[in-house]
Image (cartoon, rainbow, N blue to C red):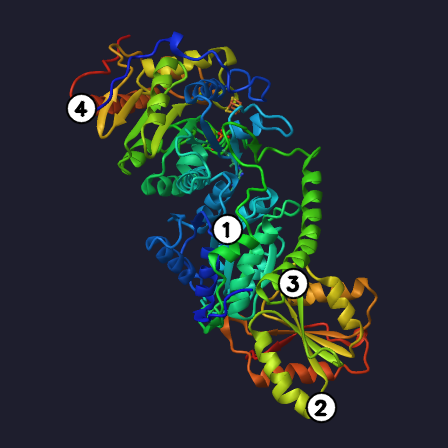
Amino acid sequence: MAGKKKLPLSGNTAIAYAAKAADVDVISAYPITPQTTIVEKLAEFVANGELNAEVIHVESEHSALSAAVGASAAGARVFTASSSQGIALMYEIMFIASSMRLPIVMAMATRALSAPINIWNDHGDFMAASDTGWVMMMAHTNQEAHDDVILAYKIAEHPDVLLPVITAIDGYFMSHTIEPVEPIEREEALKFIPKKVTWRVLDPDNPVTMGPLGTPEWYYEFKRQQHEAMKKAREVFDEATKEFEKTFGRNYEPVEYFMMDDAEYALVAMGSVAGNVKAYIVREARKRGIKLGLIRVKLFRPFPAEEIAEVISNLKAVGVIDRALAFGSSYGGPLYGDTLSAAYIRGIDTPIVNFVAGLGGRPVTFHDIKTMVDATLALDGKTRKDVPKEPYFIGVRE
Amino acid sequence: MSTKPKIPTIWDIPREELFAPGHRMCQGCGAAILMRHITKALGKDAIIVEATGCVEVTTTVYPQTAWKHPWLHIAFENAAAGASGVEAAIKALKRKGVIPKDKKVKVVAIGGDGGTFDIGLQALSGMLERGHNVLYIVYDNEAYMNTGIQRSGATPYKAWTTTTPVGKVWRGEWRPKKDIMGIVLAHRVPYAATVNPAYITDLYMKVRKAVEIEGPTFIHAFSPCTPGWRIDPALTVTVARLAVQTGVWINYEVENGEFRVTTPVSRRKPVRDYLKLQGRFRHLTEEEIAEIQRMVDEEVERINRLVGKTVIGPVVK
Ligand SMILES: Cc1ncc(C[n+]2csc(CCOP(=O)(O)OP(=O)(O)O)c2C)c(N)n1
Ligand code: SF4
Ligand SMILES: [Mg+2]
């Protein structure tokens, strides 16, 4: 079992400690707020000889991920990190990294996308990455942010998966907020994620061609295999979290249920806002006798549709908090879209309503949560036909 | 000081082929000649990172490959960044004892002119500036050939391309070719050279040198393109040789700041001889040819000044 010593770490520092424990070989990243302090910390580790890695001071995020692809293809354990515009600039290579089945791990400190330029938190960048073929997790404590990096390598490098993984935290709310974290030491980390190259690498003694042209005769099969790998990622996530709990004593599930045992209503959320919802449930809702719970989605890709549908099927009404917008879509927020389809495909009639909140760092207050809870409760006794067709825009000036 | 190895002869070039036939490059493709001889000169201990473009699409049609080297293609603008990553990985893994310290591996990036002069310039600059031990080779066919002959920053003055067509108003490309060697040399790289597929031993020597030198090295390769330049596939090498004989292309190397012309031309042929074999210059008037001649004369003069003597002679009709 792990040592019990805790350190006061920001989310970003907690992530850097985990990358160090994972003994990454190559770090390829470009500064952007609020991610920057992750790579600053890692540079410090390397500068002090605490971590034996090559730091590539790339000239852009496009090159950061391109170099990460190159380094991973050469057999290195690779780490990168970014936010917002950096993710947008990486976009082209994100598809290539996953399609080439390279187990790169990227930490994301989520931040709003320009324009207008905004360094504060929402999930616009995270959601923009949602169809790039990466496994995606989002933490809601700094301990979880730390542990996720270790879990990420476990999943990414599994021979049945071989996909890149994003471990996200909320910019500022977590990246720059200090919490007690029990860091995993290098030795115990490397027992959990041994350095073993499980993928094909570039080697003059065993030459392979990587990144060929795929004609219509072949392309589709590559994509089908990626779909299968994503499904495998879910199985491996479950195995990995079980082993993680045995080793480190902390338990993670694809979905965290908070006060859901007797719940009649629930909010679905991701990231730091889940903390506010938890506080509201304990301090307000439950005191008023409202049987409200929280469904926090930790694993976003592959989406834990089965679990979410299952728990929703027993509820009277559900509200989904989105911290991003899918402009022009039939639903509103991306998390809502996934939740809705998970329920619809399984014939679940529970009314599910969408709240868009906290864009560009707008605080999501207790009052906002109350508004969302009230609107959810108002759907009691209704069916999905009665759900508003537009999301509620919480906390916006109309 | 420049190192002066024994000038190789054609007999020094290895017989072993590391670039397999059966690829889909056009008949008479200059880049195909280049790749064949570059891979021979590299020898087996290299990892190649290729940019999107003609060479990439024609040589790796899944499930076949023309490459006997380990070879990686990521995208169009990032061969230099990808190569930086491969090189950094090897460095880290050697230091950590995962790869034997004495294992010889040179990382080589290859890109077209579009992937190098234009969209990949930033990644190239980053790679050069950071000092990666990578040889970057640009095969310059003077346009985006893979997408159908669109102009690039490397397209020469007055050349027809599909995006600089010859019409009532336009007369082909109206801007001079970008000085990529100047840009590269501004990064103070230890070695940069130009090569031409009509001068294979010169190419062989330069690739060998660029491989041996530690740090970022660069080779700018002249690469005739039969459909793009509208030339007879039988005349690729003739056109390449004429480029040197007319002074349109100068074979040189810059080693630690020391400039050396490797293919001196005592008597130049007129540029007309080079231009007239190519359909992309078919529309040129006498005045336009004279203008191009003047531009070449000026460049030749600049090179002679750099060398400090006349290495490229006057035009002799
Ligand atoms: C980001 C991006 N933009 C555009 C393209 C389309 N594209 C592919 S190859 C190419 C031109 C390549 O030109 P060059 O580098 O000169 O190589 P060549 O084909 O001439 O050998 C273009 C425009 C692409 N693949 N990626
Ligand atoms: S289009 Fe030009 S560069 Fe491309 S393969 Fe054909 S000859 Fe070679
Ligand atoms: Mg070209």
How crowded is the residue under tag 4: few (<14 C-alpha within 10 Å), some, or many (20+)?
few
State the image coordinates of residue A282 (x, y, percent, origin top left).
63, 85
Q: In the displayed structure, would residue B90 be above or below residue A347?
A: above
Give the spatial CA distance, label 2 vs label 1.
47 Å
Q: Amino acid at mark 3?
A: Gly
Per the image, the residue denoted by label 3 is A328
Q: Nearer the viewer, mark 1 or mark 3?
A: 1
Identify the element where label 4 is drawn: helix
Assess disc 3: are there few (<14), some (14-19) or many (≥20) residues with their C-alpha within 10 Å of its C-alpha: few
* Figure quadrant of residue B136: top left
**Which quarter of the rendering shows the C terminus of chain A?**
bottom right
Is disc 1 placed on a helix, strand or loop? helix
According to the image, label 1 marks what residue?
A90
Q: Chain of mark 1?
A: A
Left or right position of B188 against A328: left
Q: Quadrant of the N terminus of chain A?
A: bottom right
Q: Is residue B75 visible?
A: no
- Three-letter code, disc 2: Gly
